[in-house]
Each structure stands twice: as structure tokens, then as C-alpha cells.
Image (cartoon, helix red, strand yellow):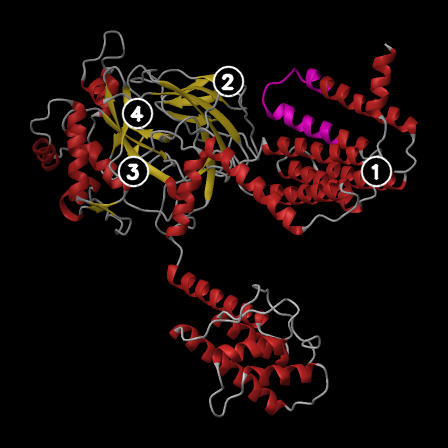
Amino acid sequence: MSRAINAIVRANRAGPPENSIVLRVAAVGAVVVSIAACVAEGELNRPVAIASSVALIAGSVFSYRRRANPMSWLKLVLAVAALGGFFWFFLHISRHGGVTSIADVLGPLALLFTWIQLTHSFDTPSRRDLGFTLAGSATLMAVAAAQAVDTSFAFYVLVWGCCCLAGLMAMWGSMAGGSPVRVQTGVIALLGVVVASAVVVAVLPAPHASTTVIFPSDLAGDVPIATPNGLVGGANGQEPVHAATADGATRVGGFLGFAGPLNTAVRGTLSNQVVLRVRADKPTFWIAETFNHWTGQSWVPGPAPPGTVQWQAVKSGSPFYLPLSAGNVVRGSPDVQTFYLAAGGPNLVFHAATATTVWFPAQRLYVRDDTILASTSLGPGSVYTVASAVANPTKAELEAPAPRGVNSTLPAGVLAQSTQLPHPYPDVARLARSITAGKTTTYAKVLALEAWIGAHTRYTTDIPPLLPGQDTVHQFLFVSRRGYCEQISTSLAVMLRTLGIPAREATGYVPGPYNPITDLYDVEASDAHAWVQVWFPGWGWQSFDPTAQVPLANPSPADALAHDALGALGQLPLIPIGVVVLAAGALTVVLRRRRARPATWTQAISFELLEAARRVGVVAPDDATLSQLAERLDTVLGPAPPGELSATALATAAEEAAYGTVEVTDSNRSELIIAARRLRRRARRTAKHDVRPDPPPGPRPMTPRQPAGAGRP
């Protein structure tokens, strides 16, 4: 027992006092930044964060002043305070009925870690204690990262990383006896961290949501909807969603097509604003609404089949277990999606087909076909999760007869809805039959029609609105053959219906850009889309799209980063960058030559003589003077040509000037430098023709020393 007590005492014994102010500032800065990150993610409120940061700084100052003489009784008080924080945490969790979502834990956990850092800051006399502060800040950053859904969190990570790097460098310097760490060491350490992080990212698999955890759900700025199962937009529960109009203020109705009717006669302007972010098992079409009634210009929900209700209320509360709509089949792999709304939108619950379970913080949901409405509006910051059964049948499976007892037929009312047409389409029917001639299965007919549309029409948003009375399909197939997703998908659906194949229109989003940092798809307004769903016996409604492709699986972070990097490189202006690189290279060469240029004219003379001697292989002992080297050089080169100076004359002039025995004018200096350059060129010509005599015998010396005064002008 005594040994255990002694071990505990030794482990808690304060180390030598830490005097590095940089280390303390970096440690406190790391904690303050992590607290700010928790505030940004909504896990701490601002008053608590400000008060905690002020108390943290005060505790750090107190510890610094008491570092050489810490209070032994203070450790016991702080330990009791830390234990009180843990007691509060567990009491808070149990008092609120346990953990029902991730958000129920993260807020109290951030407060607990902040409290521990706050109490610890009053007793950090040694380097070990400050190391714990740095490590503890990482736990707070991890709590904040658990709720981060956009790359703005990277700013906090960058600042926190700089604080940690500065703290580690100061810690290394303190361990080395107070010697400052060289900048090169810090740069090498930073590069090591970057390389290690890149390796970790490269081996990370694609994200996969687990169905064994409780999924987050939260509403922000929600307002109860006055009319049950009514479709509203924005964060105002009283604002009805209106159809898109070409001259409207927003140009679109809520989101494109998410307005009850889908008017194909107009086109709204869609921006690149991120409207929601999605974490999903796999990318797919995320459905907002489905339509089964075609009017010639618009898709509308249409009347309910006999014996059914238009909207079915689901009142079980979260999680909602959805009824299976007519024609759907629960087959395929489970797919879990969590939607984070970045902009206020309609009270539509987006999902991948076929949705089976919804985690949504409301009293009820309303379901019609594959359209799900919430009983409250959804503002920015709302979060909900949907579990779906997504089937990806093969060509052989879709062409094979449906197994018995697996939804092999559509109810008569639903079949009538799914093949309804507002008027006969003889030209469309004739075209569809000619395209699918010889095709015996529904799947083969769908592919044939898709191929024809891809080959004979052009996707463009630059088309005029339809005139009153004009039919969208007739105008697209037989007049312009130009249109966007609504015209193309509608034409495919109508062609299928003329063949008696059940088809309907679906609107929603295709996956936007994948963010490998957050493992989320950043869905932009321009990702709003419309496509066709075709019913297959035994498989239910399957999505087909002539204008967009959805990836088969989530990319790994390494693939996403490589794709983004290559895409960024492909957009770089190569010619301006090449010009800048060449200019920078030329400037570097000039600056290096200037730094290598002798500072004085005597050094310039010495440099030219040494270079001439090197070219012709003249060597001299280590203690030789410049004049002695010049004598050997003259022996090899021979007499100087008329009008030129010998190496000996040049060396003598440089030595006399260096030792201050002779004053040389500026003009004479220039003449001497020019003469020395001529001598070097003569040595180069001599070495090129290899006509120099053998050097005098003797040991091979090193470079001779320069005159003692060669550094003076």
C-alpha cells in the first residue's frame, strides 16, 4: 500500500518550473482556439466561452507567477473541482433520459472538457503540465470536429495547429536547456506532419454510416405549418411554395420544381449556393417529390386512387417508420443519409428511395407515394436522418420475371395514374414504337429511348418559355429538340406511357461535389434535377436519367483530393504561370551572381587570377601569396601580349593597394579589372588548345591565400 502511495506521490510531484513564456502563450492559445471552435459549432454559448477564456488566461498567469513555489493544497482543491465536473456531466446525461442523439452528448462534453482545462490552468508550473494543456486542447477540437459540416472549420484547425507547433518548438527548446529551436527544424517538423497526414488520408476508406448508432436530428428556426400536409417554403411556416416564374424575384419557387406542381414551361436561374450537405452510404438521387399526373405543361400530384387518401399521416414520432407506398419494394442494401440544411427551404424531407425510417424532431410526418412532408418548416441549420433501402438491380434481374409474392403487379388505380396522358400523343407513340421496335423487355425499351434522346436532342437551358397551349413534349421532340432536364425527362416519361409502361416524374437533387474533409456532399442549388422513375415487377420504382450520371459509390478521401487537385491544375493559366516562374528563376540567378560578385576591386583581381590558375591547372602551396601564384601562372601562360598586363603585374597592384602602400584611382581600378578579365580569357583559350607547359614539380597544393588586406578597397 505504501509503495502505491509513494508511486502516486512521485507521479504527481511537480517538475522543474517552466520559464518559457512562449510555451505558456501557445498552450493557452490552443485551448482558447478550441473553445472558439466549439462555439462556432454550437456546442458552447458565447458567454460561457468568453468567461472560460478569461478565467483560463488568469489561471495561466497565476501559475506562471507561482511556478517556482506551487501551492500543494491547491492540487487537492482542483482535483475535487474536476471530479465535480465529471459528476455534473453524468448527472446531466441521466437526468435528461440518457443519450438519444449525438448532439445530446457533445454539448455537455465540450463544457466538461472546458471546465477541466479551466481548473488545470491554475496549476501548471512545469513543462509536463503545459504539455497536458496542449494535449487537452486536442480533445476540445475533436468535440468541435464531430459537429463540423463545412470547410470553415479548417480555419480553426489551422490556427490551433500553429499554436501547437509553436508550443512544441518552445517545449523542444526548453528541453534543450533554453536554446531556441531553429526555424529549419520547425519547417521540417511541419513537413513531416503534412506528409504523415497525407499518408493517413491516402489509406482512409470511403465513409460508411453505421445503422447501430442514434442519428442526429434538430430543427432550426422552425415554424409549425398551419395547414396539415401543406407544402411551404423558407423558414416561415405561413409562406406557401410557389411554382417557378421567369420574372419572379427569386426566379425559382423555393427550390426548382419543389412547389407542388412542376411547370416545365419556365426555367428559373439556379446559383452555386450550397443549400444542403449530405452524409450518405452511397451517392444516389435524393428525392424531394414524385408526380404522376401530366397536364401537357406541368406535373401535378393528381387525385388519389379510389379507396386511398391523398396524404397519409405518420404519428409515431421520431423515429418514424414509414408505410410502404403502392408499387415500392423493400429490396437492396440499406442506405443511411443525414441531411444538414445550409439554407431555409420547403418542408420536404429529402431521401433516397425507398425510405423506411426517418429521424426527425417533430410530432408527425405526411407521406404520399415517395414524397414526405414535415409538419414544421425547416430553417438553416436543421438536421435529419433517413434510412432507405436502395436497390441496384442488374440488367438480367430487371429483365427476369418477378418472383411470386414480391409486388409483381401494380394496383389498378396506381397503374392508371402511372400511364395517364392528358390527350392522345399519336406522333409520340409512333416515334416511341419505331425506336423500341424489336425490344421485348421494359428495360430494353427504356435504354433504347434514352439512347435516342441522347443522340437526337441537345441539353441546354437557353430556350424560350412555352406559349400558352403549347405542349412541352411535342415542342421538344418535333420542333426544337432542345431543352433541359425537365423537358428531357418528361418526354421520356410520356414516350414510355404511350407504350403502356408505368412511369412518373421525380424531382430532387443529384449529389453535388464531395468534400473529403467533412465526408459530405455539398449540394448546390444548381444540383436540383428532374428524372424519370419506371416501375418494374418485383423491384418497384427505379430511377432513369438521360442527362446525368450518379457515381456508384462514395469516393475515398484520397481519390476526392486527387480529383480536386487535378481539376484545379487543369484550370490554371499555364502561360502566365510559366512567365512568372521564368522571371523568378532569372531573378534568382541575378541575385546569386550579385552575392557571389567580389565586394572590392582587389577581391575582383584575386578572383580573376584564381579562376585563370584553375583553368590551366596551376596550383600553389597553402601559404603562397597572390604574387607567388601569379608567377606560376605567367610561367604557364608565357609573356603577356602587347598592351596587356601579366599576372604578376596584376597581383602586385592588388597587394600594394590592399596593404595601403599605393593609392589607385577609380579609372585605374577599372583598367586593372578589365586586364584581369582578359587574362582569365587568355587562360581559357590556353586550356582549350592544351598548349600549356608542364607545371613545376612539387606537392599538389591547395588554394593559395589572398593578401591580408584584400578585403579593403
Which of pointers 2 and 4 lies earlier in the amino acid sequence?
A: 4
Cα separation, mark 1 vs mark 4, equals 69 Å
Q: Is residue 344 left or right of residue 89?
A: left
Indicate the amino acid at tag 2: Pro
Task: Report the mark closest to the observer, 4 or 3.
Answer: 3
Q: Which numbered mark, 1 or 2, is in the foreground of this view?
A: 1
Q: Please tell me whether mark 1 sits on a helix, a strand or a loop.
A: helix
Provide the residue designation for mark 1.
59
The mark closer to the camera, 1 or 4, is 1
Q: CA distance from mark 1 to mark 2?
A: 45 Å
Label placed on residue 37: none
Q: Does residue 704 sit above or below 328 in this rendering?
A: below
Q: Circle 4 sits on which residue?
A: 303
Q: Secondary structure at mark 3?
A: loop
Residue at 25 percent across and 51 percent down: it is 463
Magenta region, main secondary structure:
helix
As drawn, which residue projects farthest toward the top?
Answer: 405
Asked whether 130 falls inside the magenta stretch, the response is no
**Residue at the disc numbered 2:** 319
**Residue 251 visible (yes or no):** no
- Residue 522 sits in which quadrant? top left
Q: Position of residue 24 (x, y in %)?
A: 78, 42
Judged left or right of residue 370, residue 150 is right
Marking on residue 548: 3
Q: CA distance from mark 2 to mark 4?
A: 29 Å
Name the kind of residue labelled 1 in the image: Gly
Residue 504: image x %, image y %?
26, 28
- Mark 4 and mark 3 lie on one chain; the one further toward the N terminus is 4
Disc on the earlier residue, 1 or 2: 1
